[in-house]
Amino acid sequence: MFLTDSIMELKGVGEQTIKKFNKIGIETIEDLVEHYPREYEDRRQIAKISETVMDEDNNIVATVTSKPEIMKKGYKIIVKFRVKDETGSIYIVFYGQPYMKNNFVVGDTYNFYGKIRRQYGRIEMESPEYEKLEQGTSQKTAKIIPIYPTTQKLSQKVIRQLIEQALSLALPEIEDPLPEDFRTKYDLKSKNFALTNIHFPSQDEAFFEARKRLVFEELFFLQLSLFVLKSDFLARTKGRSKKLPESFKDFLAGLPFEFTGAQKRVMNEIAKDLKSEYAGNRLVQGDVGSGKTVIAAASLFIAIKNGYQGALMAPTEVLAKQHFEFLEQVFNQFDIKVALLTGSTTAKEKRGILAELATGEIDLVVGTHALIEDNVEIPKLGLVITDEQHRFGVRQRLKLSEKGETPDVIVMTATPIPRTLALILYGDMDISIIDELPPGRQPIKTNAVDSSYHARIYQFIDKHIREGRQCYIICPMVEENEKQSELKSVTEYAAYLKEQVFPHFEIGILHGKMKPKEKNKVMEAFAKGEIHILVSTTVVEVGVNVPNATVMMIENAERFGLAQLHQLRGRVGRGKHQSYCVLVSDSKNKVTKKRLKIMEESTDGFVIADTDLKLRGPGDFFGTKQHGLPEMKIANLYTDAKVLKVAQQAASELLRQDPDLSHPLHQGLKEKLLDYTDGEQMHKAL
Ligand SMILES: Nc1ncnc2c1ncn2[C@@H]1O[C@H](COP(=O)(O)OP(=O)(O)OP(=O)(O)O)[C@@H](O)[C@H]1O
């Protein structure tokens, strides 16, 4: 059996089970054996019946002494029988599983694992897991039992048995991608050993060794892929130097403000990239409201005045439009032609734009995903900027840059990834950080309260709107299958506010189900001040810039990740007025309270990210897949930092010795690398 085979090849897997596995992302044998346990239960100790602990899970070995009987208790069917060991006896009880009656024979010995309770004066073990023991083999079952992540009503037993089966069939076929001398050098166990012992560790030490090997492998391939991409990028991209144009001074003079120190520093770093004969590949990280957009504008200005075209790709139409309007306004006097290309551009407009892009008449195109469509030609593309890269995969980024010959690439993000982590995750890019806010900003005052404060918050909002400000009210993030209720909660809440609380104000609604055109219209009205209160889901999360909005209330704040709360909160505090954020949550959970407290205490995205990371670990911090960080199967980017360092060194050393991985001993490595990255780009690079 091969790792690439479908799990259908396994024995005893019905269609329903396959569907359930598919739902948790498991399709092949490889997916299955890489479905690692989330924790383990130590069942190595077997308790005597006289030593069992009430109301806890106990692990016993006992012999059946009475024939299983079926009984009825109300609506419930119960199967019940007695078992004993040399110290005492208890009842075993199964609820609602009448067929259990036939599974047990008097005189046979079993290993039972389950909770023990006192019921009507009798001691019972309820619906235990069990395994029949052959005579004299009691120690065989004394094991460390894996517990798997599961959501689709797949029982632990089914997962466990299938993984056991898959391992026994597939292990002989597995070739270790890490060559032997490499494993010796870094003190790593074989892949076979690791897979066996991560699922069914024979002892603690074996588990640690197994985990170490798998964590190393995962981080090693992450690093290797980033290194290969980076060196490929450097090798491919010679020869398009862009100098500071004379008119750059006029551009800066035309801005309504001066750059902050941090903006100047980052601008210098970018200018160096642009000037260099190698194309730059730079991540610009800046906290919310730190002024990234104007850095993008200045960079585009330089490229365009050197005779190139520029492209700016944003994750949403609302943002693309906002950027377009800003850029059109600042470039207006410099004879730079800007176009907006999104999903809602009409076919006719689009034809015109595509034609003028192809001839180079349009200097700068701002847009969404629409920019990477194949029919968009930007022959003189010299600078690509993507905003909020987490919404775009690396591949989409590359696809846009491939439209030009060797454009410089800048990625802007407000996600406060701690520097240590950023260095690793963006190993293929240089990093600049805007770590200073424009002058005159007052820190946003944040309060976490429970819902008994609603009346007071509404009064507070009322007062601020009367003073001429505006307000956001955010309703919780909604899971995919709850789309309907997203609509409901936002529209219903807005209707309630309009009728009961703020009949005298204009209230706007924004949610994910609206057409981009409708969203744009609402955002425009809000930006113009025609809407006083915007009731919205997280669609306003990134980039929206309405400096007159000064109050944000976030309902069910416990449902958001801290990074997301920080992003959301960053929609206020963007102008000269004091701004406020109220986090409403009735959660009594201690960790939740601590997390909301961090929001009260700090407005620094990096501090928040770091604290949250310590509190919850990176998986939780980045929350969902939408942030696009590489998803780790086993490694924890934070706690496995040491292994990560070693993996990084190992990857760089390997590439120094064998840059294109052509050595026969490295074929397994190369294959795995192509697999890891889905091939396409990596094939080119190697
Ligand atoms: N040096 C500066 N001095 C004063 N105001 C500035 C400066 N730089 C930018 N701004 C203003 O600060 C606001 C935020 O800037 P911008 O929209 O570029 O932030 P951002 O970094 O993109 O934030 P976010 O990630 O939250 O969208 C804008 O209104 C912008 O005009």
Image (cartoon, rainbow, N blue to C red):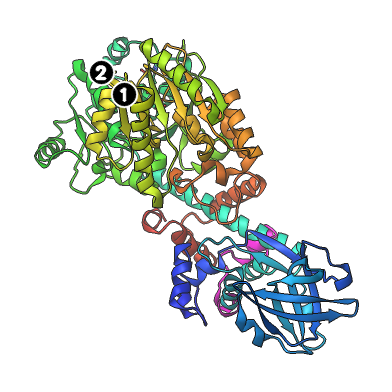
Residue 589 in the image: above or below residue 158: above
First along the sequence among labels 1 and 2: 1
Between 125 and 474, the one lying in front of the other is 125
Beta carbon at label 2 within 8 Å of ligand 1: no
Residue 310 horizontal/vertical position (percent)? 26, 32
| Residue at position x 14%, y 36% in the image | 353
Residue 358 horizontal/vertical position (percent)? 14, 39
Between 353 and 152, the one lying in front of the other is 152
Q: Give the range drawn in magenta.
A: 167-189
Q: In this view, does 612 lie to the left or right of 321?
A: right
In the rendering, which numbered label is found on residue 297? 1
Q: Residue furthest front?
A: 74
In the rendering, which numbered label is found on residue 321? none
Residue 637 in the image: above or below residue 30: above
Query: Does the image show residue 383?
Result: yes
Q: How many labels does the image show?
A: 2
For label 1, the SS is helix
Amino acid type, residue under disc 2 in the picture: Val
Q: Quadrant of residue 172?
A: bottom right
User: Is the residue under label 2 in contact with that under label 1 (CB below 8 Å)?
Assistant: yes
Residue 285 horizontal/vertical position (percent)? 46, 30
Query: Does the image show residue 544?
Result: no
Between 39 and 355, the one lying in front of the other is 39
Magenta highlight on residue 188: yes
